[in-house]
Image: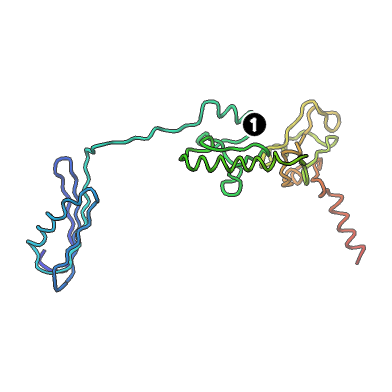
Amino acid sequence: MYSMTGFGHAEGSFGDIQVSMDVKSVNSRYLDFKLHLGREWLELEPLMKKEIEARLARGRVDVFADIQSTSPDLLVLNMAIVPSAGTAELARTLGVPLSSEGFFMEAHLKMRPMDFMAEGVFVAGMAHYPKFIEETIAHAQATAGRAITILAKQPLYIGGSVAVVDQSKCVGCLTCVRSCPFGIPQIQPEQAGVGGIIGAASIDPALCQGCGTCTGECPAKAIQLLNYTDQQILAQGLGAWAVV
């Protein structure tokens, strides 16, 4: 280096050792040397400092050294974690979804990490996704607490604002089956729809989330949202006009 202010870069290899060096210096009244090395190479610092002091008398010098070995002393590999063989069959039996990796997928990552969309079914541990033992224990405890809130209720009430099918109007078009974001409606082949056609839609009130999507999509108006039927909504408007 021919000036106290400058920058230099160099690369080289020594056997199975790859070295990349960056040196920058600025004007200074005294020699201020700083070496930036990885922790495993700190024993080289006195030797490199000696070489720098032999060539420079003043200046603020920063040396950045990246030293990599292509033949490490120990190579550690983690075993892959994959879903168990019966995960897909269990998911079909319980009617719960799987992630793209094949693990059970929760209802909501932040709001409902222990629940499925199917009420009363919960997930915990590495069936959810690969995790450390501390997180697995915490998840299992949270799931147990979530299950207790249901088991402690005597009696257990279900329903509320859920969709109800008038099977005498159902034409079996499968619109509700396709549009429901939770996959709740099903066609029951033993039930008869409008005109005696075989197969009519059915919605389990214990599973329905009450979103009203199927109610708005049904072309035959065979599905109504309990406590929010078309007749109730229209009557509310007429009552408001009557008061005026």
Q: How far across and how far down the image is residue 238, in percent?
A: 89, 58
Residue 238 drawn above or below residue 197 = below
Q: Residue at x 20, y 49 (%)?
A: 41
Q: Residue at x 13, y 71 (%)?
A: 30
As drawn, is 232 to the left or to the right of 43?
right
Name the residue tied to disc 1: 94
Residue 6 visible within the image = no
Colour approach in the figure: rainbow
As drawn, is 5 to the left or to the right of 198?
left
Residue 230 visible within the image = yes
Q: How far across and how far down the image is residue 60, in percent?
A: 18, 67
Element type where label 1 sits in the image: helix
Q: Nearer the viewer, residue 207 or 192?
A: 207
Can you name the residue that lies furthest to the bottom here? 29
Residue 107 drawn above or below residue 1 = above
Q: Nearer the viewer, residue 21 or 189?
A: 21
